[in-house]
Image (spheres, rainbow, N blue to C red):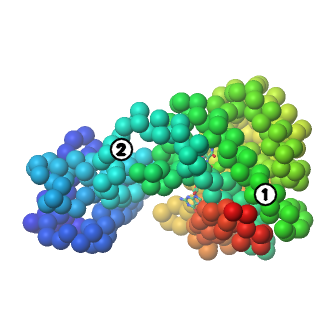
Amino acid sequence: LVKAPDALGRVSGDRFGALLVGGDDVTTLAARADAIRRAIAAPIAVGDREASLTASVGWAAFDPAAHRGRDDPLKDAEIALAFAKRGGGDHAEAFRASMRTSGADRFSLASDLRRALDRREMRVVFQPIVRLEDRAIAGFEALLRWEHPRLGRLAPSEFVPLAEETGLIVELGLFAMDQAARELRAWQHAVDVRPPLFVSVNVSSRQMLRHDLIADVKDVVARSGVARGTLKLELTESLVMENPEFAAQVLARVRELGAGLALDDFGTGHSSLAYLQRFPFDTVKIDRSLVKPDARGARPVILRSIVAMCRDLKMAVVAEGAESASDAVELAQLGCEFAQGFAFGQPLSAADARKLVGAKPAAA
Ligand code: C2E
Ligand code: CA
Ligand code: CA
């Protein structure tokens, strides 16, 4: 992919730089950056095994107006690389001028975050969760997005860790729960299906450790008037395992108050399976790493067992990261009840989610 007169070199550690000559067309550059990412992601045979690598790619087009110094294009590409990594890796990111002013300046991002709710920059988007049997929409997962005035739309991976460090996650989490419950009420009001539509909201460790989580859930459930069990909290295994005794108590209270509980990213932590019975979860969300077929197209063998076990425990099962039509078909064959993923839709704005379920738009 990199041929003379292009040049390839090692910048430092695990960072490599490619200088691509002759072409400032950004579409071509974007395609080349992505081709490099894909080439690296191709599995490599190591003996009788297969190894997979992923790369994060940051790139910048040479700009005679902005690039005065010799190193300037490389610096911009490195800023873009930092964004690509923060986006979760295996990803190519183009440099944007807005990245330079913000830099990786966590301090200013933290102060921006502090004001984001007041400035109405936070949005909640809703990704459909589909019942595999008839492909009907069963509910949605609420996911936060930050419309940053300079950086554009930021994904949770770009601000949730910071919100956790600074404690702002408590307010953000309550905001997400409140918005989700409002939308849920609108959907349930408009469509009378049995069982009723549900929404699930992510809860972080900081929120859980604060005793007010119980009070918050009580307020939101009471205020919104949604059907019992249809507002669900999603908690990860690792969060619950941080303090199992405490978690068991809080979760039991939350259930009594009429909220549902989903165990998120199941299969990525190391909880004892016995805990599944000890905590009052009604839903298990199987992490996409267990749902995705491997390089040979086979799905992890434990996927089938996990689905069977959850069904025996009378828990609803959602497979995450269903990306293709064959994912959907095979998951249904395994007996998996629900699926979520790009095969069934990207996260939607609140307005689009209402349209999809046939509810009235929100009053302006
Ligand atoms: P999660 O709970 O595992 O959420 C699912 C993530 O997977 C979402 O990313 C979603 O857009 C993405 N996804 C959905 N379908 C597919 C697919 O088919 N393939 C792939 N590769 N990805 C898919 P998103 O929105 O960037 O959220 C990332 C994480 O941020 C979430 O992971 C959750 O842990 C956290 N998060 C999101 N909203 C909140 C929130 O309100 N509070 C807290 N505490 N955390 C949140
Ligand atoms: Ca989740
Ligand atoms: Ca998840």
Residue at the spot of label 2: 102
Q: Secondary structure at mark 1?
A: helix
Which one is in front in this view, the residue at disc 2 or the one at disc 1? Answer: 2
Relative side of 3 to 303, left or right: left
- Mark 2 to mark 1 CA distance (whole Å): 36 Å
Q: Residue at x 27, y 72 (%)?
A: 28
Residue at the spot of label 1: 184
Q: Position of residue 41 (x, y in %)?
A: 38, 59
Binning the other alpha carbons within 10 Å of mark 1 as few (below 14), some (14 to 19) or many (20 upward) gives many
Binning the other alpha carbons within 10 Å of mark 2 as few (below 14), some (14 to 19) or many (20 upward) gives some
The answer, for residue 129, to whether it is visible in the render is no
Q: Compare marks 2 and 1 and give the one earlier in the sequence.
A: 2
Ligand 1 within 8 A of label 1's CB? no
Q: Label 2 amino acid?
A: Ser
Q: Position of residue 121 (x, y in %)?
A: 55, 50
Q: Quadrant of the C terminus?
A: bottom right
The answer, for residue 246, to whether it is visible in the render is yes
* Closer to us: 360 or 192: 360
Q: Is residue 52 above or below residue 272?
A: below
Relative side of 191 to 287, left or right: right
* Closer to us: 334 or 244: 244
Q: Label 1 amino acid?
A: Leu
